[in-house]
Image (cartoon, grey):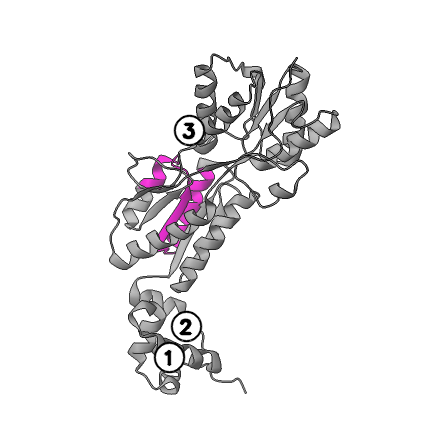
Amino acid sequence: MQKKKPTLQDVATKANVSTATVSRCLNAPDKVRTEVQQKINQAIDELGYVPDGAARALASRRTNTVGVIVPTIDNSIFSKALQYLQTGLNKANYTLLLTNNSFSEEIELREVQTLLSRGIDGIVMVGAQHHPEIYKAINRYQIPIVNLWIYDPDSEYSCIGFDHIKAGKQITTHLLELGHESFGVISGTRENNDRAEERFKGLKQQLDEAGITLEDDRVIDCRFSVENGSKSFHKLLDRHPDITAVICGNDVLAIGALHGAQERGIRVPEDLSITGFDNIEILPFLKPSLTTINSPSRRMGEKAADYILQQIKDKTNIIERIELEAELIVRETTGPAPKR
């Protein structure tokens, strides 16, 4: 005979509280005293009670889910932010629904429509460049939205991130101060990627100010992968053997470029300097270790969770624009330009 499934009343009886208190603990734990929460959670664990998500959503008009769309799940830098975003959401009994758009606005629009149809309570996206229909759809549902990895003081929508133009200038200035004048760029995907585009804009502006022309054939756009970084490095050096500094759009491309340099017998940084972007975990352990820009992924994830949860709780959509700092991390792959 099948065992009867425990009910909300069973939990309330075991914890010696009302069903209303159990419901409040599940849906708004911040409104229940810690000791009462502990009693209820213990009763839930002992009984094996599983809340009826559909019933809770119908009663509260909430599903306790937040949708998140990232450009790709290949890049570990997104994983770090998502980890801390999910931790913050879980503490408030919210679930994260994750999807990716493969750097396609059309795919992103379909994913947003799917998430909205599932009744999400808020949405997190990456960058500010989105299909125009996306904002219209989100506005119709009147749920909070925040864009990560981008900071725009004039944005119509909430954003948490950093100034990519400034970061692009920062890494370029470092190389200019080391005396480099011959540059190559492996930018990664710039189409439908305002972050990569702005970083490139920043480095180009800095080179222009220094009186250095960056010809089109010194710039390669490619998908973010180690293999593409290596292939692109070889293309750049075949075209311009005089290059002494290669700026890469992210760390994965830079690792590929470093591999390409080793294949050609080029010493880094004695013969050529290489930089990345993001500061993924492996970088300090490479030989040589990689100079990069630290992307504040953890803080983005934490602040995104705080923002979304507060907006859901208050039933408001106050626009917040939060700027974080992207720090230059100088390691072993950059050095003075070689004398030729």
Observer able to see residue 197: no
Q: Which mark is residue 165?
A: 3
Q: Where does residue 107 sit, x and y in percent of width and height?
A: 47, 40
Within-10-Å neighbours for mark 2: few <14, some 14–19, many 20+ = some
Q: Do the CB atoms of the residues marked 2 and 3 lie less than 8 Å apart? A: no
Q: Secondary structure at mark 2?
A: loop
- The residue pinned by badge 2 equals 51
Q: Quadrant of the C terminus?
A: top right
Q: Secondary structure at mark 3?
A: helix
Q: Amino acid at mark 2?
A: Pro
Q: Where does residue 307 sit, x and y in percent of width and height?
A: 33, 52
Q: Amino acid at mark 3?
A: Ile
- Rendered residue at 42%/47% (across/down): 300
- The residue pinned by badge 1 equals 8
Q: Nearer the viewer, residue 172 or 7?
A: 172
- Rendered residue at 32%/46% (across/down): 138
